[in-house]
């Protein structure tokens, strides 16, 4: 069966998505709890997680170089590990990814609800539900529109990180 996917994203769009995935909104929802546990050494866990993420990304990059067709995770792993029960491993990885996405969406939307309700008088659970509905709607309209919204959110994330870094430099108490 020939590939029938429409190539709607430009190189710039893919870079924007990559930056958004790497930075991720999760840093705003879990970094405070991590810092509460690890203290000033929280950066070690962030660097370690970054290294693990790089190895994961390189593994997938290598696999897509070996199998250059348009595959989903299941098909890619099923094909790569065919001699070692690829169907089972593909199934397991696909479900792990689905569960990770569900927990990520819940975590980030709850964090968003908490931050949003601090500025606007609205219940944080309602705000969390609304951001999920909004994200689903944008995804429904199209991938190009999703990249546009992602670019706006990513700029807000990056500006927030820059503000935290600058404020951290001035208020650092060694």
Image (cartoon, rainbow, N blue to C red):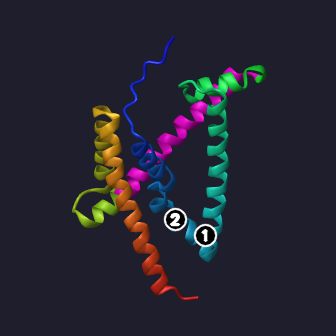
Q: Residue at horizontal 62%, vertical 50%? A: 53
Circle 2 residue: 31
Q: Element at badge 2?
A: helix
Mark 2 and 1 residues: CB-CB less than 8 Å, in contact? yes
Q: Residue at horizontal 31%, vertical 46%? A: 148
Q: In this view, does 54 lie above or below 174?
A: above
Circle 1 residue: 42
Query: Residue 31: where, in percent of width, then height?
Result: 52, 65
Q: Which of 160 and 29 is in front in this view?
A: 160
The kind of secondary structure the magenta stretch mainly shows is helix
Q: Which of 53 and 89 is in front in this view?
A: 53
Magenta residues? 85-112
Which residue in the rendered view is the most extreme toward the right?
Answer: 83
- Dot 2: few (<14), some (14–19), or many (≥20) neighbours within 10 Å? some
* Quadrant in the rendering for residue 78: top right
| Label annotation for residue 156 | none
Q: In this view, does 61 lie to the left or right of 132?
A: right
Magenta stretch contains residue 87: yes
Q: Residue at horizontal 63%, vertical 57%? A: 49
Measured Cα–Cα span from mark 2 to mark 1? 8 Å
Q: Is residue 116 above or below residue 7?
A: below
């Amino acid at each position: 069966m020939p590939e029938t996917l429409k190539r709607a994203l430009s190189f710039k769009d893919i870079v924007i998505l990559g930056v958004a995935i790497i930075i991720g909104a999760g840093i705003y929802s879990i970094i405070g709890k991590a810092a509460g546990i690890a203290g000033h050494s929280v950066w070690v866990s962030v660097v370690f997680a970054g290294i693990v993420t790089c190895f994961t990304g390189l593994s997938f990059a290598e696999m897509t170089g070996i199998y250059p067709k348009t595959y989903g995770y299941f098909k890619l792993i099923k094909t790569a590990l065919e001699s070692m029960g690829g169907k089972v491993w593909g199934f397991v990885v696909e479900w792990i990814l689905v569960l990770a996405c569900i927990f990520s969406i819940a975590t980030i939307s709850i964090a968003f609800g908490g931050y949003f309700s601090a500025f606007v008088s609205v219940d944080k659970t309602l705000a969390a539900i609304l951001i999920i509905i909004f994200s689903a709607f944008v995804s429904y309209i199209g991938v190009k529109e999703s990249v546009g919204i992602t670019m706006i959110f990513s700029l807000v994330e990056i500006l927030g990180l820059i503000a935290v870094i600058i404020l951290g430099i001035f208020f650092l108490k060694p």
